[in-house]
Image (cartoon, rainbow, N blue to C red):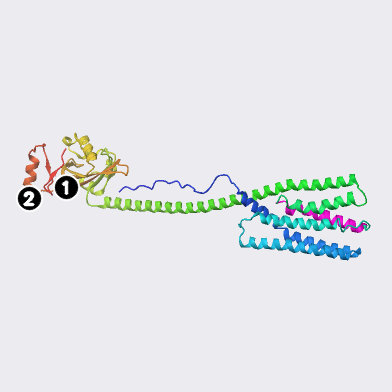
């Protein structure tokens, strides 16, 4: 019995392993999310600063104007907080929801309004006499404009929408309109404001680049997770195959052991030979019949050992025919025992081939021939002693059919 192991198979991955390409819509969505993540906090900070400003205006005797300004500040707070709250509620429903430009426009509108809120404080409500009030307003505007750079730089125009109306009108009013024009100081103030706005642009680029890297890293992590899952599935599949091969090998070994034990213990003499008729196995029954021990005949030529001299000349022709026909055959003539006695036997010869069609072994089973009586004995004797049209022919004493001769 011949067993073959399954052919090795290469498991190819169908997962994407090309360069990471980020969808611009996905990157824009992350930019909007980044800006909106600080909108509600910015609205509360602006409201708190408005409350403090109202107290300062009340303390300086300008409560009524301060109250009108605070009402406007409260309306701006409600607008910005409501927009931010609405956006966050949509984000909780679906983080991958596509965003239209309207969300960016609403955030920029809110920043313009809050910028105007502080711009009004630095122009219409600016007091030319109260120095403490002037310093307070200047510090509030500078702090608010400066602190808004980081939260809103993910969107290109979000911070300028707040900074320009909050800082430029008060600068122009204070340095060029209030009490005469201070060109040098006003120019320097506008220069600093321009520098702040300019620094916001490269920061915007860095934020966008960071968000792109985060998205690429997320894609790579997702790929890695998919690779790990696929690798786990492939490992399980390979383990299943390996277990099947191991079980097949164990079954093959078990069957080989059973067959070897059967061959060794059977009462029939069994001889296994190479395709060149060199002996490789010799069971106990063959030793009992012919007198040779297995250890002393392994490697010997079976025809040279057992065949009578007159039968050895056509072994090559017989082997060619045996492997060409690829069929079991039977030949009958005496076997030469160890003591020189010629024992009448029949050789049942079976060629064994591998899966590739290559000859592997020749199995030979030897059965003693016994004298027969009656017509069968006479028929066998007459046929063995006579000639046929093809030459001498041997008759199987059991079946009374012609046996192969060579």
Residue marked by disc 2: 373
**Few, some or many residues within 10 Å of mark 1 (<14, 14–19, 20+):** some
Report if residue 33 is visible in the image: no
Q: Is residue 143 magenta?
A: yes
Q: Secondary structure at mark 2?
A: loop
Q: Residue at x 57, y 52 (%)?
A: 222
Label 1 – label 2 distance at C-alpha = 16 Å
| Rendered position, 290 above or below 113 | above
Q: Residue at x 76, y 55 (%)?
A: 112
Rendering coords of residue 62 (x, y %): 89, 63
Q: Is residue 150 magenta?
A: yes
Relative placement, left or right, of 395 versus 233 is left
Furthest-top residue in this view: 313
Q: Secondary structure at mark 1?
A: strand
Mark 1 or mark 2: whose residue is earlier in sequence: 1
| Rendered position, 305 above or below 90 | above
Q: Residue at x 90, y 56 (%)?
A: 134
Look at the image and give the residue range highlighted in magenta.
131-154
Rendering coords of residue 321 (x, y %): 21, 38
Rendering coords of residue 266 (x, y %): 24, 52
**Few, some or many residues within 10 Å of mark 2 (<14, 14–19, 20+):** few
Q: Nearer the viewer, residue 17 or 86?
A: 86
The numbered dot on residue 368 is: 1
**Cβ–Cβ below 8 Å for labels 1 and 2?**
no
Relative placement, left or right, of 5 versus 175 is left
């Amino acid at each position: 019995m011949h067993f073959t192991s399954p052919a090795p198979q290469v498991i190819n991955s169908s997962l994407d392993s090309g360069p990471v390409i980020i969808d611009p819509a996905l990157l824009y969505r992350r930019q909007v999310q980044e800006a909106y993540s600080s909108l509600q906090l910015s609205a509360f900070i602006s409201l708190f600063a408005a409350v403090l400003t109202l107290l300062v205006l009340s303390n300086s005797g300008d409560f009524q104007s301060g109250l009108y300004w605070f009402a406007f500040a409260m309306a701006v707070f409600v607008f910005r907080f409501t927009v931010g709250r609405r956006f966050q509620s949509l984000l909780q429903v679906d983080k991958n929801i596509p965003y239209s430009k309207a969300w960016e426009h609403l955030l920029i509108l809110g920043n313009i309004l809050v910028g105007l809120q502080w711009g009004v404080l630095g122009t219409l409500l600016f007091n030319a006499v109260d120095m403490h009030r002037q310093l307070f307003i200047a510090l509030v505007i500078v702090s608010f404009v400066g602190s808004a750079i980081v939260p809103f730089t993910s969107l290109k125009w979000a911070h300028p929408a707040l900074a320009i109306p909050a800082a430029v009108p008060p600068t122009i009013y204070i340095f060029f309109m209030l009490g005469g024009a201070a060109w040098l100081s006003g120019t320097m103030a506008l220069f600093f404001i321009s520098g702040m706005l300019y620094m916001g642009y490269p920061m915007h680029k860095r934020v966008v680049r960071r968000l792109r890297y985060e998205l690429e890293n997320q894609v790579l992590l997702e790929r890695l997770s998919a690779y790990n899952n696929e690798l786990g599935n492939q490992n399980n599949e390979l383990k299943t195959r390996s277990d099947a091969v191991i079980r097949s090998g164990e079954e093959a070994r078990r069957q080989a052991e059973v067959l070897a034990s059967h061959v060794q213990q059977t009462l029939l003499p069994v001889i296994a030979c190479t395709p060149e008729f060199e002996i490789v196995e010799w069971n106990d029954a063959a030793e009992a019949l012919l007198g040779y021990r297995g250890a002393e005949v392994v490697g010997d030529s079976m025809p040279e050992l057992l065949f009578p001299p007159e039968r050895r000349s056509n072994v090559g022709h017989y082997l060619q025919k045996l492997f060409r026909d690829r069929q079991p055959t039977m030949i009958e003539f005496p076997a030469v025992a160890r003591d020189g006695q010629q024992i009448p036997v029949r050789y049942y010869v079976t060629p064994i081939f591998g899966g590739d069609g290559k000859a592997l072994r020749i199995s030979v089973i030897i059965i003693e021939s016994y004298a027969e009586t009656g017509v069968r004995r006479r028929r066998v004797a007459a046929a063995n002693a006579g000639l046929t049209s093809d030459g001498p022919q041997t008759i199987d004493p059991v079946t009374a059919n012609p046996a192969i001769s060579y």
